[in-house]
Amino acid sequence: MDLSPTPEHVALRAECRTWLEANLPWEYGQGLPPQFDDLDDEVVFLREWQGRLAAGGWVAVTWPEAYGGRGAGALTHYVVQEELARARAPELVGRIGINLVGPTLLAHGTAEQKERWLPGIRSADLLFCQLFSEPGAGSDLAAVATRADRVDGGWRLTGQKVWTSYAQFADYGLCLARTDPDAPKHKGISALVVDMRAEGVGVRPLTQVTGEAEFNEVFFDGAFVPEENLVGAEHDGWRVSSSTLTHERGTNPRQLVIHAQHLEELLRLALERGVYDDPRLQQRLAEAYVEVRLFQLHNWRSLSRLEHGRELGPEASALKLYWSEMSKRLHQTAMAVLGDAAPLWRGATDNPGDGAWQRAWLYYQSSSIFAGTNEIQRNIIGERVLGLPREPKPPERV
């Protein structure tokens, strides 16, 4: 595995850093993105920021040039994401469109669909959400019960989705729905692009323990989806969704840099609070250092596979499982370092970080659930890597 930077990648990294130094709305290497009390204001800011990034050529670099990308490989994408994270640039508000929907359209969409949606996805003029999970179909995605009944010119959707990020701001959503209710479980599912402003689409935000409301329930009551919004073939949605989920669990350069930054800040926090030499914490701090380094090596191994033109298989599950468990342990150690300040929140006195550590601890509890639960990742690793017997499945409908 030789991932030594080429002269082209060294130049690209310098170009990206120079652009960020000139275009960040805060001082490069010093400032932080503005904090918003209102999510609506934050989304407006983030859409403008993504539009600026896209105009500079730093969004969707792996997409073909015909759709605004650079036609670049995995290593170029990795370099750009590393530089954005090092600059503490906020995560793309359109990341679901960029990382999941866009690659799915490139793989399965028609030429008209690509022309219609990809430019807006890059610029954040169009925001997409992912309409996969349901109250009874999360880890077992093939159990989707939302129905798409055939009507003249398309389908009528009936059902419910849940845990849909930014659905209240989305223009469109990529939805899995059952188009043939009599087909076996993994059959009869289709992938449809839904207009989130259409009649019959209802969105209800879910307030999280942090007080934020990024997730939503989405209800369909006869919402119409036209024929031209079918992605892939009818009843072939399982294959389409499998490619979407592969992108969701790939390499994670952003989280790698973020956790390296968190580690540095954690060690600094331990020094400031006088517990760096506490024997009760030294082992945990050392383990956090080793685990972040191993996360880097996991990423590099996956990146090497992609650079050699091979798809990620169970490696993607191993990487997702590893970083989510690592993150939870690192932030649990941060709570131990905070000590008496751990239960405090924003605005409290004598609270290092003004609640940032506490919010991160709460947020990363969910890392073992999103992008496929860790229980599912362990099943994939056990069955496809270790060759263990497959988990018994209930009989399919006939």
Image (tube, rainbow, N blue to C red):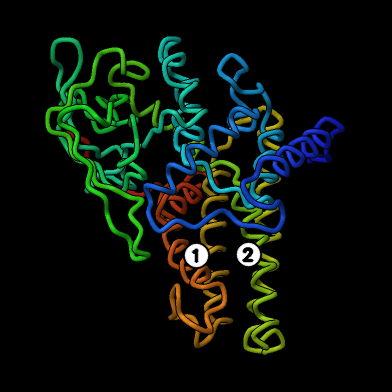
Task: Residue 60: give its label.
Answer: none
Q: Which residue is the site of mark 1?
A: 360
Which structural element holds mark 1?
helix
Whether residue 213 sits left or right of residue 278 in the image: it is: left
Whether residue 40 sits left or right of residue 156 in the image: it is: right
Question: As shown in the figure, which amino acid type bears the numbered disc 1?
Answer: Ala
Q: Quadrant of the N terminus?
A: top right
In this orientation, which residue lies closer to the viewer: 389 or 66?
66
Q: Can you say whether 189 is above or below 87 in the image?
A: above
Q: Which residue is the site of mark 2?
A: 262
Residue 79: x and y, percent? 71, 40
Instruction: Identify the residue at horizontal 16%, vertical 37% (top origin).
Output: 159
Residue 129: x and y, percent? 36, 36
In this rendering, the count of numbered labels is: 2
Q: CB of mark 2 within 8 Å of CB of mark 1?
A: yes
Q: Earlier in the sequence, mark 2 or mark 1?
A: 2
Question: As shown in the figure, which amino acid type bears the numbered disc 2?
Answer: His
Instruction: Identify the residue at horizontal 55%, vertical 44% (top origin).
Output: 316
Which structural element holds mark 2?
helix
> Mark 2 packing: few (<14 Cα in 10 Å), some, or many (20+)?
some
Image quadrant in which you'd find residue 160: top left
- Whether residue 129 is visible, yes or no, is yes
In this orientation, which residue lies closer to the viewer: 49 or 226?
49
Instruction: Identify the residue at horizontal 33%, vertical 29% (top origin).
Output: 172
Residue 62: x and y, percent? 62, 27
